[in-house]
Image (cartoon, grey):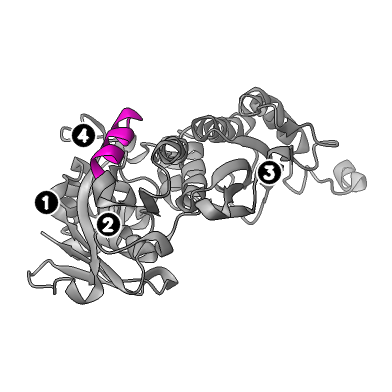
Amino acid sequence: MTDAREDQGLTYAAAGVDTDAGDRAVELMKAAVKKTHGTSVVDGVGGFAGLIDVSELKNYERPLLASSTDGVGTKIAIAQALDIHDTIGQDLVAMVVDDIVVSGAKPLAMTDYIACGKVHPERIADIVRGIAEGCVLAETALVGGETAEHPGLMGENDYDVAGAAVGVVEASRMLGAERVVAGDVLIGMDSSGLHSNGYSLVRAVVDHAGLSLEQHIEEFGKTLGEELLTPTHIYSAQILRVLAQAGVGKLHALSHVTGGGLAANLARVIPTECGAHVRRASWEPGAVFHMIGEWGSVPLADLEATLNMGLGMVAVASAESADEIVRLFEAEGVRSRVIGEVTRRETLPKPRGENDVLVQGAKGAHGGPVLVTA
C-alpha cells in the first residue's frame, strides 16, 4: 500500500524550510528595527530594498561613500553555547560602522544577513533586536536584512551573521595616513573587553584550561560566559562628535583595533616615511587579557597579534591638541590616554628588549612600521 504522505509529494516545509517561522521572526523584530529609523528612511516598495533620503548630500562639495561589511566570527559559538543571542547584534554593528568611521565617514544605513539551520523566531528576533540596539548607539538606520534557512547545510541550532553599511564623508575632511606627520601623538581608547576578534584562540584556551562558561571568575566579577559575551563598544557616534569639535586639523587618523591586534592595524594609517612608537606601560589591559594569557600560557607576542589588549580604537592627533582630544573623548564616556607618538621613520627606535615588537607591511597595507615596547 502506498503511504498517503508519498502521494502528497515533497513540500518546502518537508525539505526543512519553515516560511511561517520566518514570518513570525519578522513580526517579532519589527518594533526594534523601527526604532532605528529617522526621517531619512523611506518605506521600501514591498520591503524588497531599504530606501534612504540622501538629499543632504547635495550640500557636500565632493561626497565620498564609504562601505564596509563584516561578521562576528566564532564569538557566535559562545552565544550558542549559552543560548544568549541578544548581544551578538551589537558586536556586528560595531565591527561594521567602526570601520566606516575610521575614514571620518558618518554611517548612514546598515543591513544584516542571518543564515541558520532552522529558523527559531524568538532567537532570530533576539539577534536582530541586538543589531537594532547597536544601530541606535551608532545613530544609523537599520534599513533591511535577510534571514536564510539552510537545512542540511547547517545544524538546527547553528547560525551565522553578517552585516554591511554605507556612510559618507566630505572628501576634504577624510581622515587617513596622508594627514599624519612626525610629532603626532597616539591616543588609545579603552575597549569594552575582547570585542569580536581572537575567539578561536580564546575558545581554545578555555577548552585547554577545562573552564566552564558558567564558572564565576573572581577577577571578572562575573561568569566567564558573561565576560566573553560582553558586547563590542561602538565608537562611531562618539568619534564623530569629537571630530566635529576638534576638526581634521587636530584629529588626523583613526585605527580600529580588530583582527591582527593593535600594531598591525595602526600600521595601516602610518605613512611610509614615518613610524609609530607605542608604549605598553601607558595603559593597563583588562583582567580578561591577563587571564587568557595565563590560562593558556599564551606568549605575549601572540596575545598582542590576536587580541586588542584593552584598546579598541586609536586616534592619531597633533601633539598640541592631545589634551583637548582626550578631554573630548572622556566627555563622551570613552576613557583614553596618550600611548605613544609618530616619529620620522629613520628616528624610530630599534627593538631592544625581549618583548619589543616591530610590525610593518601588515594587513595588506604598505604603511610605516610600528614599534611596541615596554
What amino acid type is highlighted by mark number 1? Ala
Spot occupied by residue 244 in the image (x, y as percentages of width and height): 45, 38
Q: Distance between the residues labelled 4 and 2?
A: 35 Å
What amino acid type is highlighted by mark number 4? Phe
Badge 3 is on which residue?
Answer: 57
Badge 2 is on which residue?
Answer: 184
Secondary structure category for the residue under label 4? loop
The secondary structure that most of the magenta stretch takes on is: helix
Whether residues under marks 2 and 3 lie with C-beta atoms below 8 angstroms apart, the answer is no
Badge 4 is on which residue?
Answer: 220
Spot occupied by residue 280 in the image (x, y as percentages of width and height): 15, 54
Spot occupied by residue 48 in the image (x, y as percentages of width and height): 80, 42
- Decide which of tag 4 and tag 2 comes sooner along the chain: 2
Q: Distance between the residues labelled 1 and 4?
A: 22 Å
- Residue 327 among those drawn in magenta: yes
Whether residues under marks 1 and 4 lie with C-beta atoms below 8 angstroms apart, the answer is no
